[in-house]
Image (cartoon, rainbow, N blue to C red):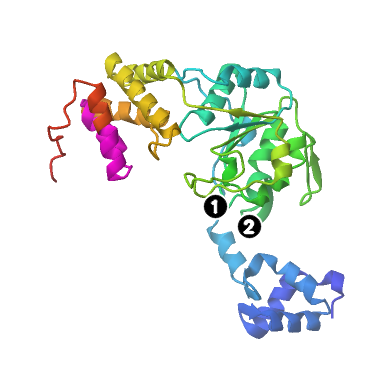
Amino acid sequence: MPRKSEVTTEQLVSNLTKNYGHEVNVAQVQQACGELGINYATGSKRLEQYKVGRGKWNLTVQEKLEKTYQSPSVEPVTHQNLIPDKDDTFVSFGNFADLKKILSSRIFYPVFITGLSGNGKTFSVEQACAQLKREIIRVNITIETDEDDLIGGFRLVNGETVWHNGPVIEALERGAVLLLDEIDLASNKVLCLQSILEGKGVFLKKIGKYVKPAAGFTVVATANTKGKGSDDGRFIGTNVLNEAFLERFALTFEQDYPNPKTEEKILIKISEQLDCKDDEFCSRLASWADIIRKTFKDGGIDEVISTRRLTHIIRAYSIFKDRLKSIQVCVNRFDDETKSSFIELYDKIDDKVDTSQPIDQPAPF
């Protein structure tokens, strides 16, 4: 009988398949380990790659993966240019100048940006990096995001397990800006970032390597809440973040929607880009959204028109060439009462639309 140190995974698999076939359970693995002179913990660890459930192993899984897996032909991240492109439609407002100063300083200074949906939080960070020619790595956070998604892990490549850096490690090593988008959707699994948010780097325990942050590395997080959950239920899925995690962000920017003049300028730039320039329509839309937001803040309505939704309307206008129809198709997402009140309000602002006339419907197929 081979000694414990000499028993290989192949020998264990061979013993199991010979005696029990390709699908085995705990009792069978224990029996095989006893015959080979190794303990169950060692045996189950060597069979980890074949595990298909609790106390279940399929010894054909690895063989199938090796035959079917093809390593994707992807350019290594280290060879890619991660500086975002400048967007000609971008108009700076709010905290943009301060954010740009922080990023241009290239010092480690984590920033938390909070504000209602669709007001350009993420876009402003990307455009600040574009103007500063700084690399940015954006990670869209969900409740499922864990350490493997952020830090990295082993991936199967041509039948071999190979370590792949996650986006956080790439940003650390490149000295890039790490953008954690929608951070308030995260679970407590993001606490793996604690040392990184202190500027100390991270130890990759799976490969025994310590990664220090390169010069220029910093973190920006965006959220619809301040990490305390959503009391009014508007942002379902947001979570209460760990206080120690939040405390590691040096400052918080509260980002509101742009004022009507700025928003009008944004819409005009987008309409010019789409070859449907209509300054009057852009002005009416900005005023309309401003009235709705003021009413929302006063508690008169439960919905709001975001800057993003206004840009959707302009894009619809470039297609349909009809003001009222463009607004209607973009506010259909709201309930009937809210939708009707929004359209009626716009009718009072713009004398070139008539809500009493039926809107052209698309021709049936």
Q: Residue at x 66, y 29 (%)?
A: 176
Location of the N terminus by quadrant is: bottom right
Looking at the image, residue 253 lies above or below residue 100: below
- Segment colored magenta: 321-343
Picture disc at residue 102 = none
Apparent side of residue 336 relative to residue 41 in the rendered image (left or right): left
Looking at the image, residue 159 lies above or below residue 19: above
Q: What secondary structure characterizes most of the magenta part? A: helix
Q: Regarding mark 1 in the picture, which secondary structure is present there?
A: loop
Apparent side of residue 155 relative to residue 335 in the rendered image (left or right): right
In depth, the one of 308 and 297 nearer the eye is: 297
- The three-letter code of the residue at mark 1 reads Gln
Q: Regarding mark 2 in the picture, which secondary structure is present there?
A: loop
The quarter of the picture where residue 220 lies is top right
- Crowdedness near tag 1: few (<14), some (14–19) or many (≥20) residues, C-alpha within 10 Å: few
User: Residue 246, percent across and down?
Assistant: 69, 39
User: Residue 34, percent across and down?
Assistant: 80, 82
Q: Which residue is drawn at 63% across and 57% down?
A: 159
The quarter of the picture where residue 95 lies is top right
> What residue is pinned by disc 2?
159
In depth, the one of 54 and 6 nearer the eye is: 54
Q: Does the magenta stretch include residue 35?
A: no
Task: Assess whether mark 1 and mark 2 are in contact (beta carbons under 8 angstroms).
Answer: no
Q: Mark yes or no: residue 162 visible.
A: yes
Q: Mark yes or no: residue 89 visible.
A: no
Apparent side of residue 164 relative to residue 260 in the rendered image (left or right): right
Q: Which of marks 2 and 1 is nearer the N terminus?
A: 1
Q: Whole-Å distance between the Cαs marked 2 and 1?
A: 9 Å
> What residue is pinned by disc 1?
70
